[in-house]
């Protein structure tokens, strides 16, 4: 069965960056399952998978525009340490949650801590990065009526 919209696809994958560092992998665990054609994966990887069948193996290089987008400088802000005084043990790499003015929950990563301020970054951790995937298609099946209704794989 070929990968096409309204089919549930399971893949094993390893993700590395340009430097060859492994960022993520499903090896040794459950494969990743998603409903094809419902934006369950980054667009570049979904289009690489289109039309393939179980057992296919391939490598794909995905540019930021087809992955998590470019880094948006307006999502990087400097905040006075005073404003972060309530956070215990503040350190670089720490993830913080904040609420934007329109009420959305935002994840921020502490990029830098200076003498008087810290740099907080709300970009996706993989924004601006060229992603290298090694993929093996584990299974392709028809989605159930419930999965189509929910818009995701179960
Ligand atoms: Zn559901």
Image: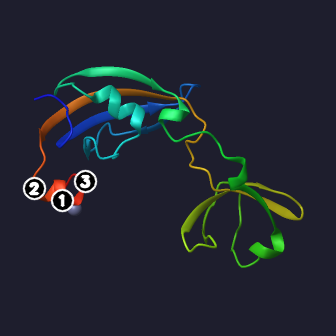
Q: CA distance from mark 1 to mark 2?
A: 6 Å
Q: Quadrant of the C terminus?
A: bottom left
Name the N-terminal-most of marks 2 and 3: 2
Percent x, y for residue 60?
A: 40, 23
Residue extending furthest right? 115
Comparing 18 with 47, the one in front is 47
Query: Mark 3: which secondary structure?
Result: loop
Q: Are marks 1 and 2 in contact (CB under 8 Å)?
A: yes
Q: Are marks 2 and 3 in contact (CB under 8 Å)?
A: no
Q: Is mark 3 within 8 Å of ligand 1?
A: yes
Q: In this figure, which residue is indicated by the disc labeled 1? A: 149
Q: CA distance from mark 3 to mark 1?
A: 8 Å
Ligand 1 picture quarter: bottom left
Q: In this figure, which residue is indicated by the disc labeled 2? A: 145
* Disc 3 packing (10 Å; few <14; some 14–19; many ≥20): some
Q: Is mark 2 within 8 Å of ligand 1?
A: no
User: Residue drawn 35% across and 45% down?
Assistant: 39
* Disc 1 packing (10 Å; few <14; some 14–19; many ≥20): few
Q: In this figure, which residue is indicated by the disc labeled 3? A: 152
């Amino acid at each position: 069965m070929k990968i096409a919209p309204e089919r549930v696809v399971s893949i094993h994958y390893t993700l590395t960056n340009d430097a060859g560092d492994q960022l993520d992998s499903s090896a040794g665990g459950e494969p990743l399952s998603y409903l094809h054609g419902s934006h369950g994966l980054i667009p570049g990887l979904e289009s690489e998978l289109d039309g393939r069948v179980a057992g296919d193996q391939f490598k794909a290089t995905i540019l930021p525009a087809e992955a998590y987008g470019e880094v948006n400088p307006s999502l990087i802000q400097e905040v006075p340490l005073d404003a972060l005084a309530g956070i215990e043990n503040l350190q670089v790499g720490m993830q913080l949650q904040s609420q934007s003015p329109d009420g959305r929950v935002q994840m921020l990563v502490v990029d830098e801590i200076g003498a008087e301020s810290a740099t907080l970054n709300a970009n996706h951790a993989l924004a601006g990065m060229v992603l290298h995937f090694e993929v093996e298609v584990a299974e392709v099946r028809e989605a159930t009526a419930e999965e189509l209704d929910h818009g995701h794989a179960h």
